[in-house]
Image (spheres, rainbow, N blue to C red):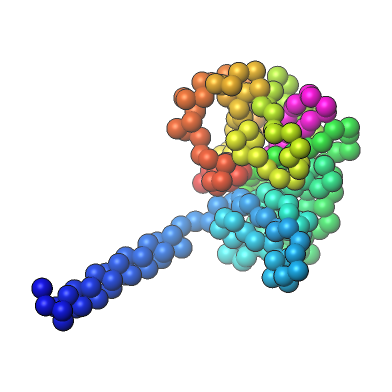
């Protein structure tokens, strides 16, 4: 193959590859935006740009396509943000060892965060899910000494957040010691999702058996179903990794 012919061939291959990449990016842009995203504020540094929260998943938008700005999370903290109704969103994160929530409205922006509760112990691994139509669920790990539990609060547009309660029978697997509570630890964090009917689905690595998961569903009319023990291998292929929209609390669409 002559030099001129080879150069023409290379230009054609590169051009075709660029066109394919552009088409793939365009196709991704046409997909519907998940109703929940993870937002992380980088650790404080001398860089001015580094102080701005960064969305790790697609930017959250309201029903009219308007971008919802990132919540005011502290530096080095990861938040869960979800569209809960048209023009309204909630975000939760860990602040000073407690799970806090902040509401967003189109008219007023993000409100100041408020703790879900003030009880002894340390919170971590918060999860948020919503159907985007007036129903949401928040869940987090609660640790008192060596005692591990999962706590939750259910949100309804008409009544607001329910009083936090423990998920009876749940024993999540322990996090590594000395890990800051505001830092999520995906391998043992709970996974939370919600369907369009407002049923929340939760699962987490079991603290009873290293090869098992525990799972339950919350029905608005009944509460939590009886906990199930599942083999870890049976759920691994069905469970999205924690960095995915489902595991990060995105509602099923």
Q: Residue at x 61, y 27 (%)?
A: 205
Question: Is residue 143 shown in magenta?
Answer: yes
When asked about the image quadrant of residue 175, the answer is top right
Q: Residue at x 65, y 61 (%)?
A: 54
Q: In this rendering, does residue 154 appear at all?
A: no
* In front of the other: 222 or 249: 249
Q: Residue at x 74, y 33 (%)?
A: 177
Q: Which residues are magenta?
A: 135-150
When asked about the image quadrant of residue 111, the answer is bottom right
Q: Whole-percent x and y of residue 64?
A: 59, 64
Q: In this rendering, does residue 82 appear at all?
A: yes
226 relative position to 182: left or right:
left
Q: Quadrant of the N terminus?
A: bottom left
* In front of the other: 117 or 64: 117
Q: Whole-percent x and y of residue 135?
A: 67, 43
Residue 20 against residue 76 in the figure, above or below: below
14 relative position to 81: left or right:
left
Question: Is residue 96 shown in magenta?
Answer: no
* In front of the other: 1 or 240: 1
Q: Residue at x 75, y 27 (%)?
A: 149
Q: Whole-percent x and y of residue 199?
A: 61, 34
Q: Whole-percent x and y of residue 71?
A: 73, 58
Taken as a whole, is the magenta stretch helix, strand or loop?
A: strand
232 relative position to 219: left or right:
left
Q: Residue furthest left?
A: 1
């Amino acid at each position: 193959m002559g030099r001129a012919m080879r150069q023409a061939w290379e230009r054609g291959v590169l051009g075709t590859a660029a066109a394919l990449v552009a088409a793939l990016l365009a196709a991704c842009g046409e997909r519907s935006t998940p109703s929940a995203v993870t937002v992380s504020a980088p650790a404080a540094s001398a860089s001015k740009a580094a102080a701005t929260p960064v969305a790790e998943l697609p930017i959250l938008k309201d029903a009219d396509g308007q971008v919802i700005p990132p919540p005011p999370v502290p530096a080095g903290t990861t938040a869960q943000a979800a569209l809960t109704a048209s023009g309204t969103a909630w975000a939760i994160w860990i602040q000073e060892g407690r799970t806090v929530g902040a509401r967003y409205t189109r008219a007023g922006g993000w409100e100041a965060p408020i703790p879900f509760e003030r009880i002894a112990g340390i919170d971590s691994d918060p999860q948020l899910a919503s159907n985007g139509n007036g129903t949401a669920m928040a869940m987090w790990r609660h640790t008192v000494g060596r005692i591990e539990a999962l706590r939750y609060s259910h949100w309804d547009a008409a009544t607001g957040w329910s009083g936090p309660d423990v998920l009876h029978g749940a024993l999540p697997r322990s996090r590594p010691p000395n890990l800051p509570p505001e830092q999520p630890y995906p391998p043992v964090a709970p996974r939370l999702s919600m369907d369009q009917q407002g049923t929340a689905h939760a699962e987490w690595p079991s603290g009873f058996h290293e090869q098992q998961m525990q799972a339950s569903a919350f029905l608005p009319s009944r509460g939590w179903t009886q906990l199930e023990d599942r083999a870890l291998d049976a759920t691994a292929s069905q469970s999205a990794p924690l960095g995915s929209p489902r595991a990060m609390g995105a509602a099923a669409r």
